[in-house]
Every structure is written in structure tokens, then in C-alpha cells.
């Protein structure tokens, strides 16, 4: 009667403590799509469109402009031309995930407004590759025109020769 109860499940493994250091916490939260990486204000979208610095392929069209921040930011414009609500939400989820995964490989200090092309297929692997390449191309265009002294990042001057038409023109 004075004995302790017998554990019918057998011996329990010792709990291994998880280190809760700042470095571990930063790496865990660093992969999230935090608000500072999002473009949400209408004026920020309009500035990117007015800048008219675009790069595109069969899957995506990207408008870019300098943001003066040490990180890239993502804005999404997914129209009904690419599908119904379920399809648009899928595009947005996949584009956010592609940005989140590729964020460290994207040029710092630019806003990217991404528009999927109607008829394109939403696949994460192709979106990651497309986003990475189009962001690099748009950043190179911005570098060329800024080096030439054509326009500051706050003007609505076109991106230069070979530019695509702005959205909605």
C-alpha cells in the first residue's frame, strides 16, 4: 500500500530541453511573411505603377520601384482575369510563399508589385524562379536609369528603352 503506482506504459524517455536562445527564435520567425515585407497602401501601389519599371515573362508581370528600405516588399494585384475567388486566392498564397522562400535572394530596397498573367499556371517552383529572375531584371533597369541620372526614385519617369506599357494603359 505504501508503494508508488506502477506505470503501465513502460519507462518514459527523458525530455530534451529545447534551447530558447535569441538566435533560435530569430531563425524560426525569420521565415514568416511579416508586415514590413508587404505593400498594403494604395499610394505605394500607385507609385510602383507610375514608375513604369517593369519586367515580365509568360507567368508574371512585375512593377518595381525603390523603397528606401533595407528589404524588398511585395504587393499583389490578382485580377478576376486569372480566375474566380478560389483561383485568385491560390495565386496569392503561392506568390506570398514564393516571395517568403526567395526573399533573401531578391534585391534589397525595392517594392515589387506582382501581377499574374491570365492563362498562366500557378506552380510554386515556376513562380519562385520567375519572381527571382524578374526582380533581378527590374532592379538592373532601376540601376541603369539611376546611374544615367534620368530620374529620381520619386518621379514618374518611365523606366527606359524597351519598357513595357504600364498596367491599365
Image: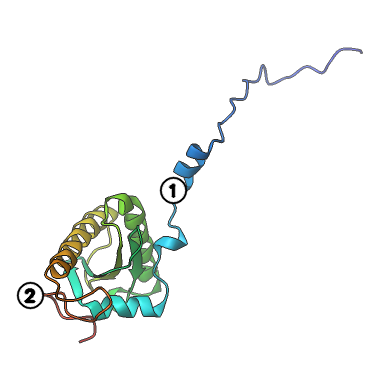
Q: Cβ–Cβ below 8 Å for labels 1 and 2?
A: no
Binning the other alpha carbons within 10 Å of mark 2 as few (below 14), some (14 to 19) or many (20 upward) gives few
- Determine which of the numbered discs, if any, sits on residue 167 in the image: none
Quadrant occupied by the N terminus: top right
**Residue at the front extreme?**
149
Please name whichever residue, 118 or 65, is drawn nearer the observer in this view of the structure.
65
Q: Position of residue 101 (x, y in %)?
A: 34, 51
Task: Locate residue 115, reporting x and y percent.
Answer: 27, 71
According to the picture, the residue beneath numbered tag 1 turns out to be 30
Depicted 33 relative to depicted 38: above or below:
above
Residue plotted at (7% across, 74% down):
162
Which residue is painted at 7% across and 75% down in the image?
161
Looking at the rendered image, the disc whose residue lies closer to the viewer, 1 or 2, is 2
Q: Position of residue 3 (x, y in %)?
A: 86, 12
Q: In this orientation, does residue 108 appear?
A: yes
Residue topped by disc 2: 161
Q: Nearer the viewer, residue 151 or 140?
A: 151
Which residue, as the protein is rendered here, is positioned at the far right?
1
Instruction: Name the image quarter holding the C terminus.
Output: bottom left
* Residue depicted at x 16% and y 74%: 159
Position of 8 with respect to 24 (left or right) is right
Amino acid at each position: 500500500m505504501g508503494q508508488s503506482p506502477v506505470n503501465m506504459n513502460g519507462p518514459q524517455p527523458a525530455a530534451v530541453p529545447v534551447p530558447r536562445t535569441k538566435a533560435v527564435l530569430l531563425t524560426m520567425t525569420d521565415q514568416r511573411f511579416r508586415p514590413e515585407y508587404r505593400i498594403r497602401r494604395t499610394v505605394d501601389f500607385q507609385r510602383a505603377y507610375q514608375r513604369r519599371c517593369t519586367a515580365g515573362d509568360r507567368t508574371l508581370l512585375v512593377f518595381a520601384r525603390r523603397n528606401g528600405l533595407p528589404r524588398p516588399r511585395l504587393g499583389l494585384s490578382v485580377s478576376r482575369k486569372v480566375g474566380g475567388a478560389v483561383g485568385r486566392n491560390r495565386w496569392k498564397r503561392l506568390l506570398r510563399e514564393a516571395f517568403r522562400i526567395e526573399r533573401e535572394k531578391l534585391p534589397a530596397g525595392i517594392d515589387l508589385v506582382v501581377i499574374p498573367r491570365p492563362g498562366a499556371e500557378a506552380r510554386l517552383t515556376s513562380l519562385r524562379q520567375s519572381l527571382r529572375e524578374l526582380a533581378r531584371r527590374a532592379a538592373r533597369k532601376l540601376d541603369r536609369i539611376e546611374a544615367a541620372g534620368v530620374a529620381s526614385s520619386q518621379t514618374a519617369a518611365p523606366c527606359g528603352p524597351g519598357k513595357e506599357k504600364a498596367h491599365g494603359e
